[in-house]
Image (cartoon, rainbow, N blue to C red):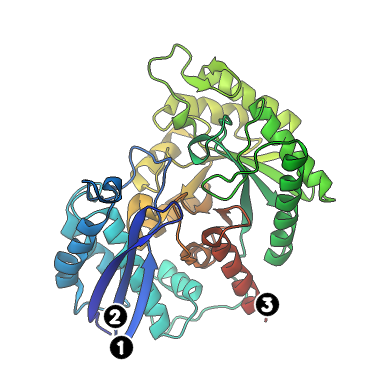
Amino acid sequence: MKIEDIKAIQILDSRGNPTLRVSVKADQKWGDFSVPSGASTGTFEAHELRDGGKAYHGLGVEKAIKHIDNEIKEALVGQDVFDQKNIDRILTELDGTENKSKLGANAILGVSGASTRLASKMLNLPLYKYIRAIFEQDGKWQPDLKLSENNFVMPKMFFNILNGGKHADNNVDIQETMIMPNRDSVAENVKIAAEVYMTLKEIIKSKQLNVSLGDEGGFAPDLESNNKALDLVLEAIVGSGYKPGEDVYLALDVAANELYKDDSDEKYVLNGDSVSLSAVQLVSLYKEFLATYPIISIEDGLAEEDWDGWKMMSERIGDKVQLVGDDLFVTNVTRIQKGIDLNAANSVLIKMNQIGTITETFDAIKLARANGYKVFVSHRSGETEDSYIADLVVGTGAGQIKAGAPARGERTSKYNRLLEIEKELNG
């Protein structure tokens, strides 16, 4: 089946900023994809093309839409919709830059994602099954592929229930304090997360703290220290009738790029604790956290170019906790390979818009997995109601996902989609 048409419109993401919704057509059917956007972004992420100027404070995406309407459409109309690897190759070659700055990674990802959703519709397959097929078959649908119904893995889910850093207007340095309910079923984990989230709100109100929300739906009160954020979440877990470290674990996204100061003797500045720390001292703080709290994952514990620090951190605590590289790796196989060579981190965060195409996302997952690194699929802070990453995490068997709080439609769309997939597989 050949691509017949491609369209794009400007929509709003969860922060009220413009983004793209792209539609690809073949055989009178359309497949759509809405592109997310990050706030705490790594320097080495693929380039998100914005318009500049006065409209939307310069954040419009009409330039990206024009590229879709012109060069991209001209290059892809007539191409096989079931050959995703070829579609993505054409897109990357048409752009021709290392970071997709000519056409924009947002334009490229929109077309790449919409193509896969269209192909799954044409085959009358759930998206996660189509993703599994092309993930295993080098990016191209094979008609005789036999998909086993019992080898899909439902992911562990990490819910961001207390926001800080660049995702909130408060004094908490840790960008995300997450909970990971420890049950086998998605339905039970969603239930636990929702209950802890509700309890946390009650506790924050009882302490006469601000119950405003951060970008990802978690609460964003001002607190005395970063430890208090962890204490509050523990109190909410216990108050909901669950045992920390057994029923529910904690996870952190420190987003240390935002703490890193080049002009500081001690490189990492924690405003909430009024301290400046070296990489060694910051890792020592993490060791204290691990001894006190049931933390199983720390994301971006150090800055994106602090490779020596990441190696030191991996040596000191890598056997005790999952160390996830986000800004460090930006879903880029070159940077992931460097991390593998240096033994930095032990897990890779996967964000499609950091790299720009579906098949390049597959490549990052495969490289990480082949070298014993865990894989962790993620949303962005500027999200849409598109639930694509829920199908991605199941289709690739990544095993872990974070999509924000168990609240707000752009977050719950992912969790609700996982509920649907689980029911379908169990049924």
User: Tag 3 or tag 1, which sits nearer the N-term?
Assistant: 1
Q: Are the two marked residues, 1 and 3, in contact with CB atoms closer than 8 angstroms?
A: no
Q: Residue at x 57, y 58 (%)?
A: 408
Residue 66 lies, with reference to residue 40, above or below; the image says below
Left or right of 115 in this view: 76: left
Question: Quadrant of the image for the C terminus?
Answer: bottom right
Q: Which residue is mark 2?
A: 25
Near mark 1 (Cα within 10 A), the count class, few <14, some 14-19 or many ≥20, is few
Give the percent coordinates (x, y) of residue 258. 45, 30
Q: Which residue is mark 1?
A: 28
Residue type pointed to by label 1? Gln
Estimate the spatial distance between the alpha carbons at disc 1 and disc 3, rounded to whole Å.
32 Å
Q: Residue at x 30, y 88 (%)?
A: 28
Estimate the spatial distance between the alpha carbons at disc 2 and disc 3, rounded to whole Å.
32 Å
Numbered label tally:
3
Give the percent coordinates (x, y) of residue 347. 53, 44
Give the percent coordinates (x, y) of residue 171. 57, 29
Residue type pointed to by label 3? Asn
Q: Residue at x 19, y 66 (%)?
A: 72
Evaluate whether residue 211 shows in this view.
yes
Q: Secondary structure at mark 2?
A: strand
Near mark 2 (Cα within 10 A), the count class, few <14, some 14-19 or many ≥20, is many
Q: Which residue is mark 3?
A: 426
Left or right of 414 in this view: 136: left
Residue 31 lies, with reference to residue 154, above or below; the image says below
User: Tag 3 or tag 2, which sits nearer the N-term?
Assistant: 2
Q: Nearer the viewer, mark 2 or mark 3?
A: 2
Residue type pointed to by label 2? Lys
**Which of the labelled discs sits on residue 75, or is there none?**
none
Q: Secondary structure at mark 3?
A: helix
Give the percent coordinates (x, y) of residue 75. 16, 70
